[in-house]
Amino acid sequence: MTRHVAMWSGPRNISTAMMRAWENRGDCEVFDEPFYAHYLAHTGLDHPGRDEVIAAGETDWRRVAERLTGSPAHGAALTYQKHMTHHMLPHMGREWLANVTNVFLIRDPRRVLASYIRSRPNVTAADIGFLQQQDLYQHVRAATGHAPLVLDAGEFLRAPEAQLRALCDAVGVPFTPRMLRWAPGPRASDGVWAPHWYSQVYRSTGFEVPAEEEIELPATLAGILQEVTPAFEALYARRLRT
């Protein structure tokens, strides 16, 4: 029986590095933001590479959900699904979430915003996924009867092996050291949007603790930060501690 791990993150987190780690196991098929094409087609938003994303992806969310809960194309025993929480639009059904193991990946919203505006200067609270992340967390908790795992990127990067071991144990798969290191460069599994967003991941060979730097956000982002911080803090209080 295939085990499906769905990792729910906002943008500008370590979700792509995490995808590298899971793909490097050797027994895992990965999905890079499988709802992105539907999200762009439905919302009409202008993202870098928008037309290419829609052309390359599946715009019917039902077909995507069916694929995510079915048997992997190459017979893998495990899938890792890198999801953006804001891609789950209100009209999209959530019944399929009961058939995957849901994990939530959070990051300090100040750092998310500082990174996001380097690639896309115009941003709203809906773009960075914190409110949707809290909503999805509450849905999964109510639907399954237990609290799903929450990982904080900052704490994860300070102890990646310990956190990965705990994560693997929580989702019921063996840990392998292969998850800690990988070859640099692009992967065939990367979405077509990768050249716009993945430059740092292309250079990476493993999880690295980022340099501690002061975050100075434009005053125009103060309202967004105030709006999303309570959602982040609610999930941060439930984070995995190792």
Image: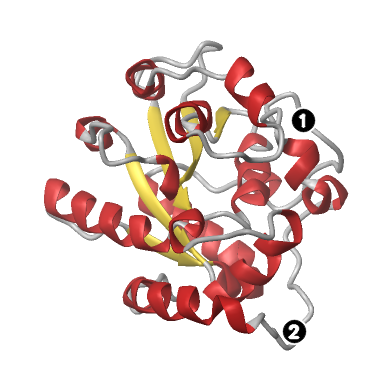
- Residue drawn at x 23%, y 31% is 93
Q: Residue 232, position in %: x, y? A: 40, 73
Secondary structure of the residue carrying tag 2 is: loop
Instruction: For label 1, count other residues whose C-alpha is less than 10 Å away and answer few (under 14), some (14-19) or many (20+).
Output: few
Task: Give the labeled residue for mark 2.
Answer: 212
Q: Front-most of 231 and 142?
A: 231
Answer above or below: position of 207 versus 22.
below
Q: Which mark is residue 187?
A: 1
Instruction: For label 2, count other residues whose C-alpha is less than 10 Å away and answer few (under 14), some (14-19) or many (20+).
Output: few
In the shown orientation, is residue 164 left or right of residue 52?
Answer: left
In the shown orientation, is residue 106 left or right of residue 13?
Answer: left
Ranked by sequence position, the earlier of labels 2 and 1 is: 1
- Residue drawn at x 61%, y 69% is 113
Q: Front-most of 11 and 176?
A: 11
Residue 159 in view (yes/no): no
Residue 26 in view (yes/no): yes
Quarter of the view holding residue 209: bottom right
Q: Residue 216, position in %: x, y? A: 70, 85
Answer above or below: position of 212 versus 152.
below
Amino acid type, callout 2: Glu
Q: Residue 179, position in %: x, y? A: 66, 47
Quarter of the view holding residue 50: top right
Amino acid type, callout 1: Arg
Q: Front-most of 175 and 104?
A: 104
Secondary structure of the residue carrying tag 1 is: loop
- Residue drawn at x 80%, y 38% is 195
In the shown orientation, is residue 48 left or right of residue 239?
Answer: right
